[in-house]
Image (spheres, rainbow, N blue to C red):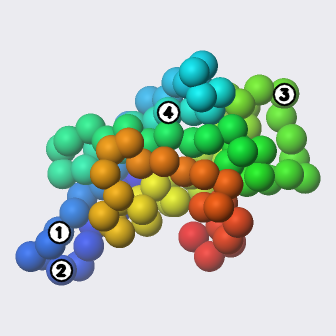
Amino acid sequence: MLFATKNKKNAMNITFSGKFAVNSQAFGINFEAVVNGNSVICSVSTDALQDIDPSNPYDTVEQQFRANQSSFEAIAEQKIRSGALSPVVITSCDVGNTENL
């Protein structure tokens, strides 16, 4: 997925590599964004994984991430464009209003 701003002066190309891993220390998921050719780590908290779609729980954090990957990528893209630095952390507070993404 590629996102680019229309303002060429501050153009920011953001792609998502599809790479992700379970973060066993934080019990969440880390995934990779590539911003203007530079790798940016995005971290999804356990609470965010649980709260993104509470009506559709999955057995593992990996299953929950895969089922909602596009929403997490959209949240990360929005945070990066707002100036968030690596690691971009997605918490439960960030997933409350995903219907507008």
Mark 2: which amino acid?
Answer: Asn
Q: Secondary structure at mark 2?
A: loop
Label 2 – label 1 distance at C-alpha: 6 Å
List the residue tagged with mark 2: 7
Q: Residue 35: horizontal and vertical position, in percent?
A: 25, 50
Quarter of the picture holding the C terminus:
bottom right
**Label 4 with label 3: CB-CB less than 8 Å:** no
Q: Secondary structure at mark 1?
A: loop
- Please say if the residues under marks 2 and 1 sit with CB atoms less than 8 Å apart: yes
Q: Which mark is residue 56?
A: none
Q: Position of residue 100 (x, y in %)?
A: 62, 76
Q: Residues within 10 Å of mark 4 (few under 14, many from 20)?
A: many
> From the viewer's perspective, is the residue at label 2 or at label 4 nearer?
4
Q: Earlier in the sequence, mark 4 or mark 3?
A: 4
Question: Which residue in the structure is indicated by mark 1?
Answer: 11
State which tag comes first along the sequence, 2 or 4.
Answer: 2
Is residue 36 shown left or right of residue 25? left
Q: Position of residue 96 (x, y in %)?
A: 70, 66
> The disc labelled 3 sits on which kind of residue?
Asp
